[in-house]
Amino acid sequence: MNEVRTRFAPSPTGYLHVGGVRAALFPWLVARHYNGKFILRIEDTDRAREVGGSVDIIKQSLEWLGILWDEGPGVGGAYGPYFQTQRTQYYHQWAMRLLDSGRAYADIRQPGELEQLRADAQTKHKPFLIRDYRPANPPSWKPGMPLRFKSEPQAYSWHDEIMGDLTAGKDAVDDFILLKSDGLPTYNFGHIVDDQEMHITHVIRGLEYIASMPKYLNLYEALGFNKPLFAHMPHIMGPDGKKKLSKRDGAKSVLDYKQEGFLPEAMVNFLALLGWNPGDGREMFSLDEMVDSFSLDRVQHSGARFDERRLIWMNGSYIRLLSLDELYDRCAQYWPVEAKGYDKTYKKQVLKLLQERLKYLSELPELSRSFFVDLPLNPKLISTHKQLAKYDNQSLKRLLETSLVDLKDCDFSVDKLNDRLNGLLAKTGEPPAVLFSLIRIATTQAQASPPLAESLAVIGKERTLKRIVRQIETL
Ligand code: GLU
């Protein structure tokens, strides 16, 4: 087989959401699987929709996830340039061939004209095909005029690497614009020329393009190009499973996930499973394992639902797999300001406790603050606590006083603390849900925390006792 060459061809219209990144990941996996090349091409011919800075954002998003391109912006390559607006000579050249062979015509109809014909056909319940209304005597084409493809209708059968064997009747083939009046190609024309010039072997893209396949096949033939393999990926549906995930409905940028402390390896793993599974029930993969097992014929046909809770779960699982040193390194930017001045050893003790609970790294400030400072007392923690709310202040006070006495002469190692705390349960006759919750609230100002003895050992004896005294005083 020739070298496998796949591409990701985003338009620079803003940030990449998870759907956009998966459109890069699948072709990247195919390229890596076959030791081929992955190309990044920027389809920037729609100037009106362009959003400044998008290319950088796209590059940063891919780089963060390790979806690196072998050719494209910033990297170069033998088939550049990789921005469509810099490739006009190619489109022009192939457009002229079509014109010369009678497979294209200048279309200078007023914008409203075709719409009117379409509306008329609709009222008559007739299918509307532009090719039925070709201008009788088109002017000879000159730069500045739109150029339209002259199709040759026929039925098609073709294979899609994901969707299987497909067919379409003649009516799916129609004329379409190749070059716009600004001289730039439409997507329909530009991508076919580029895929040919860049020797792309697998066109892997979103399902929204599958309906246009008969038109594209007709154009491949008119141009005399060999057809690459085609694979149309299922849509990614929003959380309700009904609508396609979209920016309009709040789909976030992948860089927001980066900011929130999602790990790139978790994100990639999650994205790979949006529509694909290896068929053996595995859920967590390293990048290498994904590259190894990925195949287009195991991509599902139906839409894949984007479930952020699953991403959060997966991220937490990846956090737990990190060594303490790796976790420490990754947390560098997430510590709360209150952690300033604390050394690495202490912070690692804190992380060791939190590693089980962190779902993403930006939770760190909230979960760790009480290890660094005395937080202001929050009376709601007791009044809204399921068990503690039933106790009056005097009883709670007595419980804390008893605890204080026993903790005062306790060595603050985890084992000793566990013994002492269990002893306190026996002594007071209260269940952990009451006594430990109370001590936890007094010492961490939170209803939930890592195991109590471990937490107190890190907070230290002096601060623990001081915090209990402070709580007693307010009761
Ligand atoms: N520029 C198109 C888009 O952003 C690319 C589609 C393709 O991969 O061919 O959706």
Image (cartoon, rainbow, N blue to C red):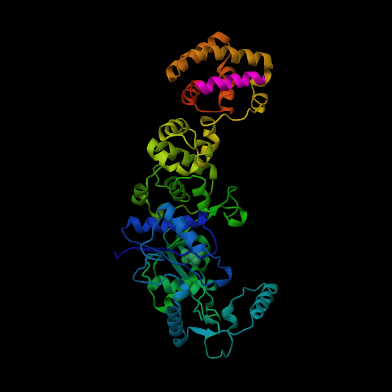
User: Would residue 150 appear left or right of 250 to someone viewing this image?
Assistant: left
Where, by quadrant of the figure, is residue 412 drawn? top left
Residue lying furthest right:
123
Q: Nearer the viewer, residue 387 or 343?
A: 343
- Residue 296, quarter of the rendered image: bottom left
What percent of the width, then of the height, locates residue 413? Answer: 43, 19
Residues 416 and 89: in front is 416
Q: Is residue 418 magenta?
A: no
Taking the magenta stretch, the answer to whether it contains residue 463 is yes
Picture quarter with the C terminus: top right
Residue 4 % position (x, y):
33, 63
The image shows residue 363, relative to residue 420, as above or below, that is below
Looking at this rendering, what residue extends furthest in the left direction? 1
Q: Is residue 57 above or below residue 463?
A: below
Q: Is residue 138 above or below residue 409?
A: below
User: Picture coordinates of residue 399 (x, y %)?
Assistant: 60, 14
Percent coordinates x, y for residue 118 in the rendering: 65, 75
Please give the range of residues in magenta.
462-475
The residue shown at (50%, 83%) is: 104
Q: Residue at x 35, y 62 (%)?
A: 70
Please name the predominant secondary structure of the magenta segment in the image.
helix
Query: Which residue is drawn at the image coordinates 33% and 55% (left, top)?
Result: 33
Which image quarter: residue 382?
top right
Closer to us: 267 or 236: 267
